[in-house]
Image: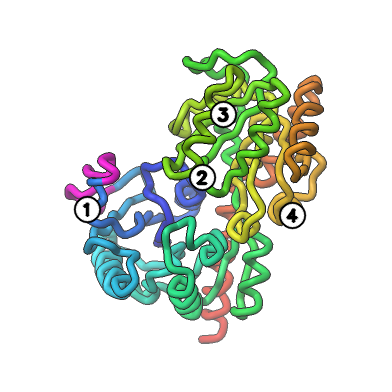
C-alpha cells in the first residue's frame, strides 16, 4: 500500500490530496491520513466533531482507507510539533499493521512532522505542495521554525516531489532527488457541465466572470473590483477568511453585479461553472502565490471555460494560449472584457478540454506511481 499523509482533511473542500488519493487508489491501495487533529478543533470548527469519534481508521472505498490521528491541543505549535510527530508515527504504525501488507511508500505533505520509517516503508517521499515558509504568516505559523522542520522532513526523504516549478527549483538546491509533478484536473467531473442542474440563488446577468477558491490574503481584491467596475457580472464561489478585508469585501458584495455563494461541495461546482463564461485566477504577487499551483486554472479549462490569470510561475509553466495572463487591475479587467465578448464555440471548448485532459489527475497519479516504483526498482537492483 501507499500511505498518504495529507495536508487537508478528506471530507473538507476537495483539494489536491483527495484527488491524488482517489486516482492513486486505482493503481495501489492507499491509506489517506488526515493532518493531526486536536481534540479542541471542534470548538472553532464544529464540523470536525464527528472525526473525534471512533473508529479513526475506516474504509472509504475499495483500495482506499482513511486514518484520523487525534493528538494533543496545538499540534502545530512551536515546542509541540515533535510530540505530534511521535503520536502520528504511532498511529501510522498501528494502522498499517491492522490493514496488513507491505507499505510501498509514505508520501508526506506534512512539512512539520517527520514520520518517515514508521511503517517500514520502502520509499519515503516528501510532497512539497507549496512554498510553506513563504506562506507561513498566512498559515499562522512561525517561518523560521517551519523552515527548520521542513528541511528536516525533506532530509529524511528519498525523493522530493514538488507541485510547482519554483518550489521544484528551490528544492533542487537542497536535495539530490527532486521531481516536478504539478496538480491536475478531474476532467470527468466537468464533462457534462453545460447540462448540469442550474444552481439556485444566482440572479446575475450573463456573461459572467467567476472565481472558485478560498478568498483570503492570497486574493487580490483590486482585480475583482476592476472587473466589477466595468459593470461585468462577478460570481464568487468558495470560503472567505473572516479576517481578510471585511469592510472592503462587504462593499464589493453590495454591488448589484456581484454575488458570493460561499463554500460549495465539489459535486456542485459543475452547476456553478455552467453559469461562468470566464474563470478568474486573481492572485496577488507574493512568495506563497509564486510557489503555488492554482488548481482552479485546469478546472476552468476542463469545463471548457476561458481563463484570465495573474502572472505566476505555474501559469507560465502550462505554456498555453488558452490562459490569458494579466497582472495590473486595468489589464486584468480589459482581458476579462475581451474573453467575455468571445463566442464559446464547440471547437474552442473541445480544445480547452483536450488540454486539461493532458493534465488529468489520473496522469498525475500515474506519475506518482512511477516515481515510487523507480527508487524501489533501483534498490532491488542494487541488492542483487
Span of residues in magenta: 44-58
Q: Residue 325 in the image: x percent, y percent?
A: 77, 43
**Which residue is denoted by mark 3 in the rendering?**
252
Residue nearest the viewer, comparing 310 with 59: 310
* Mark before the other along the chain sequence, 1 or 2: 1
How crowded pointer 3 is (Cα within 10 Å; few <14, some 14-19, many 20+) is rated as: many
Which label sits in the foreground, 4 or 3?
Answer: 3
Q: Secondary structure at mark 1?
A: loop
Task: Report, in whole angstroms, how far the alpha carbon at label 1 lies from the one at label 4.
Answer: 41 Å
Q: Secondary structure at mark 4?
A: helix
Q: Is residue 210 above or below residue 131?
A: above
**Which residue is denoted by mark 2 in the rendering?**
216
Which label sits in the foreground, 3 or 1?
Answer: 3
Q: Check contact, mark 1 vs mark 4: CB within 8 A.
A: no
* Mark before the other along the chain sequence, 4 or 3: 3
> Is residue 43 something that shows in the picture?
yes
Q: Secondary structure at mark 2?
A: loop
Amino acid at each position: 500500500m501507499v500511505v498518504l499523509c495529507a495536508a487537508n482533511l478528506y471530507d473538507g473542500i476537495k483539494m489536491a490530496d483527495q484527488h491524488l488519493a482517489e486516482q492513486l487508489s486505482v493503481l495501489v491501495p492507499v491509506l489517506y491520513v488526515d493532518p493531526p487533529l486536536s481534540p479542541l478543533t471542534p470548538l472553532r470548527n464544529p464540523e470536525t466533531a464527528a472525526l473525534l469519534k471512533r473508529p479513526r481508521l475506516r474504509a472509504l472505498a475499495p483500495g482506499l482507507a482513511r486514518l484520523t490521528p487525534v493528538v494533543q491541543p496545538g499540534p502545530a505549535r512551536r515546542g509541540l510539533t515533535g510530540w505530534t510527530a511521535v503520536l502520528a508515527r504511532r498511529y501510522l504504525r498501528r494502522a498499517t499493521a491492522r490493514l496488513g501488507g507491505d507499505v510501498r511508500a509514505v508520501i508526506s505533505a506534512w512539512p512539520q512532522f517527520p514520520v518517515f520509517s514508521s511503517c517500514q516503508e520502502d520509499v519515503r517521499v516528501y510532497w512539497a505542495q507549496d512554498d510553506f515558509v513563504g506562506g507561513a504568516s498566512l498559515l499562522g505559523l512561525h517561518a523560521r521554525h517551519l523552515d527548520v522542520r521542513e528541511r528536516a522532513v525533506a532530509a529524511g526523504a528519498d525523493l522530493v516531489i514538488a507541485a510547482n516549478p519554483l518550489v521544484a527549483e528551490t528544492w533542487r538546491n537542497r536535495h539530490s532527488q527532486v521531481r516536478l509533478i504539478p496538480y491536475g484536473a478531474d476532467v470527468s467531473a466537468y464533462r457534462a457541465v453545460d447540462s448540469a442542474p442550474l444552481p439556485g440563488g444566482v440572479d446575475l446577468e450573463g456573461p459572467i466572470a467567476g472565481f472558485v477558491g478560498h478568498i483570503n490574503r492570497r486574493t487580490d481584491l483590486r482585480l475583482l473590483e476592476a472587473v466589477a467596475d466595468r459593470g461585468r457580472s462577478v460570481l464568487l464561489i468558495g470560503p472567505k477568511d473572516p479576517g481578510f478585508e471585511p469592510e472592503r469585501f462587504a462593499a464589493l458584495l453590495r454591488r448589484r453585479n456581484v454575488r458570493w455563494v460561499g463554500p460549495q461541495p465539489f459535486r456542485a461546482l459543475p452547476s456553478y461553472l455552467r453559469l461562468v463564461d470566464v474563470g478568474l485566477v486573481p492572485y496577488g504577487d507574493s512568495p506563497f502565490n509564486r510557489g503555488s499551483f492554482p488548481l482552479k486554472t485546469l478546472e476552468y479549462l476542463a469545463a471548457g471555460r476561458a481563463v484570465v490569470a495573474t502572472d505566476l510561475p505555474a501559469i507560465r509553466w502550462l505554456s498555453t494560449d488558452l490562459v490569458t495572463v494579466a497582472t495590473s487591475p486595468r489589464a486584468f479587467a480589459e482581458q476579462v472584457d475581451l474573453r467575455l465578448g468571445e463566442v464559446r464555440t464547440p471547437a474552442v471548448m473541445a480544445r480547452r478540454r483536450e488540454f486539461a485532459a493532458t493534465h488529468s489527475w489520473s496522469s498525475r497519479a500515474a506519475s506518482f506511481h512511477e516515481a515510487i516504483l523507480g527508487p524501489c526498482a533501483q534498490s532491488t537492483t542494487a541488492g542483487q
